Amino acid sequence: MNKECIEKILEAAVRAPSGDNVQPWDIKVSENFAQIDVYNLPEKDESLYNDQQIASFIAHGALLENILIAAKHLGCHARYQLFPEPDNAQHVVTIQLSKATPEPDPYYDAIFRRQTNRFPYRKVKISEQTLQALQQTVAKIDGAKVSLVTEQDTIEQLADILKVNDRIVFENKKIHQFLFDKIRWNKQQIEQTQDGMPVDALGLSFMEKLFFPLLRFWGYVSVANVFGLSKIIELKCWWQCRQASLLGMLAIKGTDKAAFVEGGRAVQRLWLEVTVQGLSMQPIIGLTLLIGQLRQDRLNALSEKHQLFIQQANEKLPELFGLDTEDTLVMGFRLGGEVGAEKRVKTLRKIASQQT
Ligand SMILES: Cc1cc2nc3c(=O)[nH]c(=O)nc-3n(C[C@H](O)[C@H](O)[C@H](O)COP(=O)(O)O)c2cc1C
């Protein structure tokens, strides 16, 4: 394998999504460019959502999928092993590369175009063909499946549940603080850190942008909540979900760390297919992560009121999405037609090219 090819593979790898764009990975390449090892960096995401590193393992799955797609596209055969060191839970994957004939893949270009779109969407009819393409790409990953809801009545019932995802962020001090630590307010901060989320990636309207900087102060937020701030934020999420062309839930079998990495691969495949189809997507993962914690009796860090919200979501989501109660929920999402692509900004990535 040569350096140029590896550099291209790594460039694609790091375009993977991660919670608040924390990029919780450390990538090492062997001297002969035939092996890539990826390590998790727990210190990158100490948020309440990332209990047992599950959010990070989903991100690693997306990164792995990018590597596999790019390798094939650029003419490498890739074989991988998850968690190759039994005593090192942070060594997520080792990938062996060898030369092969390039197999062009439309997902390769989509890797660089994929983005989180938090703006409202245009309601478009999703064709049967597109629905099938989304199902099929997820089904390529063992144990993964996706439920897609286009029926308006069910969308409205789901919107009512999914909306708590955003409310909790403004009612829990720790979650709020973590999010605002990851917001980048100006060009200089964006370029200096090369991580986190530019404020312009948050899907705010002109009016919202005016008062949003105030919301970084918890004191202000907790007073404003008395006057209904968190409920207004919840309402926006509800409206955006209600207006979506489709609401979906991606699920996997199993709850161990390897299952979440494979789940992350499925997340990325789904998102790349959405991109190829010219549609927009926003993940709603905070809620599914908290549901996972509830199922393992690990939700103590949340208030009783929030625990109740999560319990209700846990009861209703599988039923409305037609999933089995033992399916592990990985990612809820809304999907729709793109509006105003020019308003969206890209999140940056740190370059990964460290060698062993
Ligand atoms: C595990 C995980 C959880 C995420 N949760 C959310 C979420 O709840 N809401 C949201 O808007 N974006 C969520 N995202 C999207 C990230 O914020 C986004 O991928 C990151 O900021 C990089 O931006 P990009 O997707 O535009 O490249 C999540 C991504 C991952 C991988």
Image (tube, helix red, strand yellow):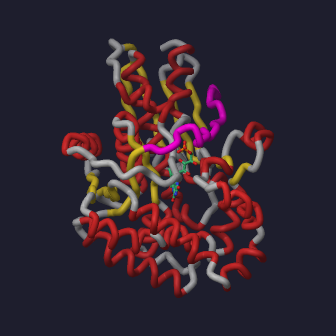
- Horizontal side of residue 288 vs 192, given as left or right: left
Of residues 250 and 200, the one drawn nearer to the viewer in this rendering: 200
Query: Would you say the magenta stretch is mainly helix, strand or loop?
Result: loop
Of residues 215 and 356, the one drawn nearer to the viewer in this rendering: 215
Residue 49 quadrant: bottom right
Q: Is residue 343 magenta?
A: yes
Q: What segment carries the magenta color?
A: 338-356
Q: Is residue 236 magenta?
A: no
Image vertical order of residue 335 relative to residue 7, above or below: below
Residue 314 quadrant: bottom left
Q: Can you see residue 216? A: yes
Quadrant housing the C terminus: top right
Q: Percent x, y for residue 65?
A: 41, 37
- Horizontal side of residue 175 vs 166, given as left or right: right
Q: Percent x, y for residue 225?
A: 66, 80
Of residues 128 and 39, the one drawn nearer to the viewer in this rendering: 128
Q: Percent x, y for residue 163?
A: 47, 70
Q: Can you see residue 141? A: no
Residue at image location 68% in from the left, 51% down from the top? 199
Residue at image location 71% in from the left, 62% down from the top? 212
Image vertical order of residue 336 relative to residue 152, above or below: above
Q: Percent x, y for residue 41?
A: 61, 48
Residue at image location 51% in from the left, 48% down from the top? 117
- Horizontal side of residue 167 vs 213, given as left or right: left
Residue at image location 34% in from the left, 24% down from the top? 105
Of residues 60 and 203, the one drawn nearer to the viewer in this rendering: 203
